[in-house]
Image (spheres, rainbow, N blue to C red):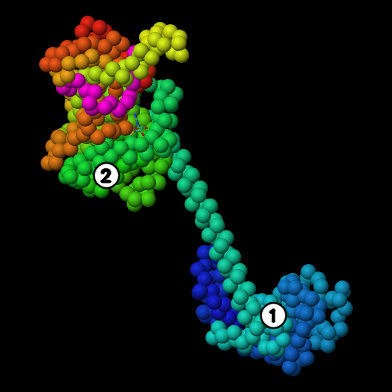
Amino acid sequence: MAQYMENDGADDIPDLSDSDDDDQWQSMEESPDSNLKVLCLFCDRLLNSVEDTLSHCKSEHDVDVAGLLRKYKLDDYGYIKLINYVRSVKCSGESLLLAREGSLPWDSEDYMRPALQDDPLLQIDIEDLCGAECGGQGAGPWLEQNGEPQSPGSLMRRAQRAEERAQRAEEALARAMEDLHRLKQLAQSLVMSADVSGGGGGAASGGAVAGLREDEDEAYFSSYGHYAIHEEMLKDKVRTESYRDFAYLNPDVFKGKVVLDVGCGTGILSMFAARCGASRVVAVDQSDIVYQAMDIVRSNDLQDVITLIKGRIEDVALPVEKVDVIISEWMGYFLLFESMLDSVLYARDRYLAEGGSVYPNSCSLSLAAVGDERRHADRIAFWDDVYGFKMACMKKAVAPEASVEVLQPETLVSEPAVVQTIDCNTVCVSELEFEADFCLKITHGTLCTAIVGYFDIFFDKNCENKVSFSTGPRCTKTHWKQTVFLLEHPIPVQTGEELKGRIAVRKNRKDPRALLISLNVRDVKQTYSLQ
Ligand code: SAH
């Protein structure tokens, strides 16, 4: 190595190895020792450099050191021993040529000790020495100047070093990639074990759903882990564009605000809020879809604004004390199926700052009368004759199950009636179970075969541009469709008549995410389950 190392092109290759050796090499290249004096191996002459010394040995003493290395196939240690031996015993050059392979006089560990302190001859790279000689040019690497290669041998060495450096860089890169992979895994496991100790909600503050044990609710959250359900929701333009329009048409609602997205799914609502200038969005979801949301948020370069947390909103500790806005798409079939509004109300009571708002801010649940004898026959009368057999008992099983389907608007036979309105900023969980009278003004005299239920959603609090959408049968269909309550025994109705009834909506005690809906129409009561 040492002072005559040529520039091996290292500057061209990024050095990721961070090797001390390399630094040393560089500093040696940059500041050669101009006062160096090297004592000849065979006389008292002091020469200016190692190369001069070896040339001198060759011309004045007939000893070609490189030739000796080749002759006796000496490696680094053999070379060191040879130099120390010559200096110690002060032998003649001739005697060196006569040594016998297998019993070389310098082949003793004693000659590993330097005979001369800081002997420059011991600091050279024998590859340099041999390489150049072997290159057959008779010119040593020391003849190279200003980093200009002078021989094929030196070119070869440069190539070798470049290759070594490339290999070291490759190894360093592989190590860096491995570290990165480990970091990613660590981050993921940290998120997965998001502090679940900070909650403290429970049934008292969040209702029956908040009181569910994790294993009881597993099926619910795992259904949201699959991409398909999110694809269906995102493709529901009525739904998604309403949230988008509300945000984009009312950016002031979000600008500079801290926003909480309850049940963020793919993160779409959080990203709308972030695009409108929210200063921070905290997005929470218990389902595994949140891992996709992490990638999605990063892909859109919104990771500095949106913080994703995996866990139930009732259980996680948020990184903020209070939020200015809560957004959530919590609506299920017949509005309340899934009981996710309980979780939003929990979040509202726990995190919403004074003067803050929950969006959507209000919603209504409506009923209307349906006259569709064909559909009724297909579902009820069908059982009277099945391939010539009576199965009428099955009717009792069919009627009590509410069905989710798209209703043909021409089958509507009454005006709609709102049976419940919900102000998301003030309602409490207990009010989500209710009873109400209704009165349906009949528009077509016919047989009323069913009652249909649907909901409307409003974003109209503290904003300039109000947005709303309806899941009713006269509007563009949504993935919520409508909920149909079949009347086992149809009721004849007259145009202009008011069909009076009463509805009761309860959570199913056995499954708080499911609903039990009782309808009492003209003194006939039927309880329907929605599950
Ligand atoms: N906001 C998304 C997804 C809505 S679906 C969108 O608009 O596309 C409802 C999401 O809320 C689901 O991903 C579900 O896993 C999540 N969720 C429901 N209850 C929750 C709770 N208590 N805590 C955290 N996430 C909840």
Residue farthest along the bottom direction in this orientation: 60
Q: Quadrant of the C terminus?
A: top left
Residue 404: within the magenta? yes
Q: Is residue 253 left or right of residue 260?
A: left
Reading the image, the residue beneath label 1 is 131
Tag of residue 455: none
The spot of residue 200 in percent (x, y) is 33, 25
Q: Nearer the viewer, mark 2 or mark 1?
A: 2
- Residue range in magenta is 398-417
Instruction: State whether residue 293 is above or below residue 477.
Output: below
> For the residues marked 2 and 1, what is the alpha-carbon distance in whole angstroms?
67 Å
Classify 10 Å Cα crowding around label 2: few (below 14), some (14-19), many (20 and above): some
Amino acid type of the residue tagged 1 in the rendering: Gly
In this rendering, does residue 264 appear at all?
no
Report the predominant secondary structure element of the magenta stretch.
loop
Reading the image, the residue beneath label 2 is 272
At 69% from the left and 88% from the top, the residue drawn is 137
At 50% from the left and 74% from the top, the residue drawn is 11
At 41% from the left and 38% from the top, the residue drawn is 227
- Name the element at disc 1: helix
The spot of residue 326 in percent (x, y) is 24, 35
Residue farthest along the front direction in this orientation: 388
The spot of residue 53 in percent (x, y) is 68, 88
Depth check, front residue: 232 or 196 = 232
Q: Quadrant of the N terminus?
A: bottom right
- Name the element at disc 2: helix
